[in-house]
Image (cartoon, helix red, strand yellow):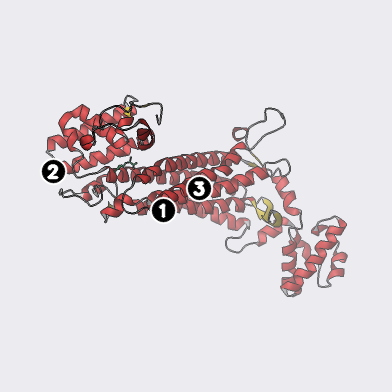
């Protein structure tokens, strides 16, 4: 039905053994297909078992369950866990979801005591805690993946702190920058992404377990105890909110979308840079593909896929927002549609981070090509204008105009700014002296951009050192 290893039963079966008390007939097969989530939420098995173990231990500790029952449940759940991990567990679609599958098997194994596990609990708070635990792990995985990616960019930046390349606006050559500076721009982006995952994790780290169906429970449960056992900072404070909140998943998706957008931007740069027309950087054979018909081709397929991943991740984000929009409190089955989207987005993100880390680590800059490109397109025109302000005392607007005239002259002659003769320049403005040549070279240009956060190699090295220390 939903997946091949999920056992389907025919619709003539008896009423559901977990909630069939008031049902005379079993569900229609199609009803079961649309209703069951076991095909995908079995992925939450470890979280489900951890949540149940914490719940059972608490029920035992406060005396709601006898100590022996609580212990039997805790042990039995470990048996279920190993059955699942060993691939021996039979997931059953008629048991709807991971919660009922685990509980039913537990009862098969330990008998009567298994039926006591669900005291003071509902699947509503159960799924809320399972999913939160899962998303919390993904935040940690994203943080880790991003740290690795930042290290890969840092290594590139450190090696090429003073390699010049063209900086672009509108994809037109603007001013020379350094390779290291360009790499460090991505370190900043991915650092912000990392802080968004950390921040989301901090906010989601409250435990909804014990909210029960929606109103809390009359049993004297200890929610602080279960929260602590599951590594949460505290229990959530409102039971209605606890079972109906999916903000944590939305925040994860939002952070993942922004991160995937950053991945897509560097992916696009790689596609451009590795093209025969640009040749700014070479991707290793490990991260490129050939063409089945054109022998000369080396395609940046991985970069193209990374450019596309945001489509899926943002799609999942929009999907979950749309599911949650306008839902009256509290839990509605609509919310079962949250998981597949988040699973897919998380998988895409983790794979994307790993692939980008590998690709950046292996990438080689074509220093000569970069340098030549940096010097073309009159990239030091701003330096020339700044020199006129500094050395000849011109107002910037006038300097801009004079420089524009010189650029037009060079363009007519088919040469670059440094190749204009001094006499040609003084004819345009008499304040120009031989000293101007000191700023027309690209190396001097980048060295002069010493403002904090600027492209000067010393600035880049300072940022590399700062981030290396921060990453540890
Ligand atoms: N499979 C359900 C989900 O993913 C679990 C919660 C079911 N709760 C309920 N009242 N039907 O949302």
Q: Residue most toward the top? A: 88
Residue 381 shows up from this direction: yes
**Earlier-in-chain disc, 3 versus 1:** 3
Query: Viewer-proximal residue, 186 or 131?
Result: 131
Tag 2 secondary structure:
loop
Q: How far across and how far down the image is residue 454, in percent?
A: 61, 60
Residue under the point 38% across and 26% down: 5
Q: How far across and how far down the image is residue 63, in percent?
A: 12, 43
Q: Is residue 291 left or right of residue 21?
A: right
Mark count: 3
Which callout, 3 or 1, points to the residue nearer the camera?
1
Tag 3 secondary structure:
helix
Asked if the residues shown at circle 2 and circle 3 are in contact, with their CB atoms under 8 angstroms apart, the answer is no
Q: Quadrant of residue 92?
A: top left
Distance between the Cα atoms at labels 3 and 1?
A: 16 Å
Is residue 120 shown above or below 18? Answer: below
Residue highlighted by disc 1? 325
**Earlier-in-chain disc, 2 versus 3:** 2
Q: Quadrant of residue 34?
A: top left
Residue 252 shows up from this direction: no
Residue highlighted by disc 2? 64
Badge 1: few (under 14), some or many (20 or more) residues near its Cα, within 10 Å? Answer: few
Residue under the point 66% across and 59% down: 447
The CB of the residue at mark 1 lies under 8 Å from ligand 1: no
Q: How far across and how far down the image is residue 357, in percent?
A: 53, 41
Is residue 126 shown above or below 234? Answer: above
Q: Which mark is residue 314?
A: 3
Badge 3: few (under 14), some or many (20 or more) residues near its Cα, within 10 Å? Answer: many
Q: Quadrant of residue 115?
A: top left
Q: How far across and how far down the image is residue 179, in percent?
A: 64, 50
């Amino acid at each position: 039905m939903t997946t091949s290893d999920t056992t389907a039963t025919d619709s003539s079966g008896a009423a559901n053994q977990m909630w069939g008390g008031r049902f005379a007939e079993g569900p229609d097969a199609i009803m079961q297909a649309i209703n069951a989530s076991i095909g995908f939420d079995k992925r939450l098995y470890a979280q489900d078992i951890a949540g149940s173990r914490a719940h059972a231990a608490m029920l035992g500790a406060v005396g709601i369950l006898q100590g022996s029952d609580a212990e039997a449940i805790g042990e039995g759940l470990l048996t279920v866990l190993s059955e699942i991990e060993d691939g021996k567990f039979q997931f059953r679609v008629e048991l709807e979801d991971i919660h009922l599958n685990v509980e039913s098997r537990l009862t098969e194994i330990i008998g009567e005591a298994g039926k006591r596990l669900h005291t003071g609990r509902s699947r509503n708070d159960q799924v809320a805690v399972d999913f939160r635990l899962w998303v919390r792990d993904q935040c940690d995985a994203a943080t880790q993946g991003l740290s690795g990616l930042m290290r890969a960019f840092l290594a590139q930046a450190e090696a090429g702190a003073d390699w010049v390349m063209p900086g672009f606006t509108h994809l037109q050559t603007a001013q020379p920058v350094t390779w290291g500076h360009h790499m460090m721009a991505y370190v900043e982006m991915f650092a912000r992404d990392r802080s968004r995952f950390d921040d989301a994790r901090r906010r989601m780290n409250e435990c909804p377990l014990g909210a029960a169906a929606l109103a809390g429970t009359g049993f004297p449960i200890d929610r602080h105890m279960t929260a602590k056992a599951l590594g949460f900072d505290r229990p959530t404070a409102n039971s209605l909110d606890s079972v109906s909140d999916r903000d944590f998943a939305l925040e994860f998706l939002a952070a993942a979308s922004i991160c995937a957008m950053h991945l897509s931007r560097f992916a696009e740069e790689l596609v451009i840079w590795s093209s025969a027309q640009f040749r700014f950087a070479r991707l290793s054979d490990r991260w490129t593909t050939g063409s089945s018909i054109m022998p000369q081709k080396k395609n940046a397929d991985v970069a193209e896929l990374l450019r596309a991943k945001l489509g899926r991740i943002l799609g999942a984000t929009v999907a979950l927002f749309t599911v949650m929009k306008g839902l009256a409190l509290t839990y509605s089955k609509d919310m079962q549609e949250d998981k597949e989207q988040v699973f897919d987005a998380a998988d895409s993100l983790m794979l994307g981070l790993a692939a980008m880390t590998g690709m950046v680590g292996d990438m080689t800059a074509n220093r000569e090509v970069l340098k030549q490109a940096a010097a073309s397109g009159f990239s030091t025109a701003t330096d020339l204008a700044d020199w006129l302000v500094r050395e000849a005392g011109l107002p910037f607007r006038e300097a801009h105009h004079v420089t524009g005239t010189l650029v037009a002259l060079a363009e007519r002659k088919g040469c670059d700014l440094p190749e204009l003769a001094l006499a040609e320049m003084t004819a345009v403005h008499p304040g120009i002296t031989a000293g101007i040549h000191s700023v027309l070279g690209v190396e001097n240009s980048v060295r002069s951009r010493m403002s904090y956060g600027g492209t000067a190699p010393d600035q880049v090295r300072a940022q590399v050192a700062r981030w290396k220390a921060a990453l540890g």
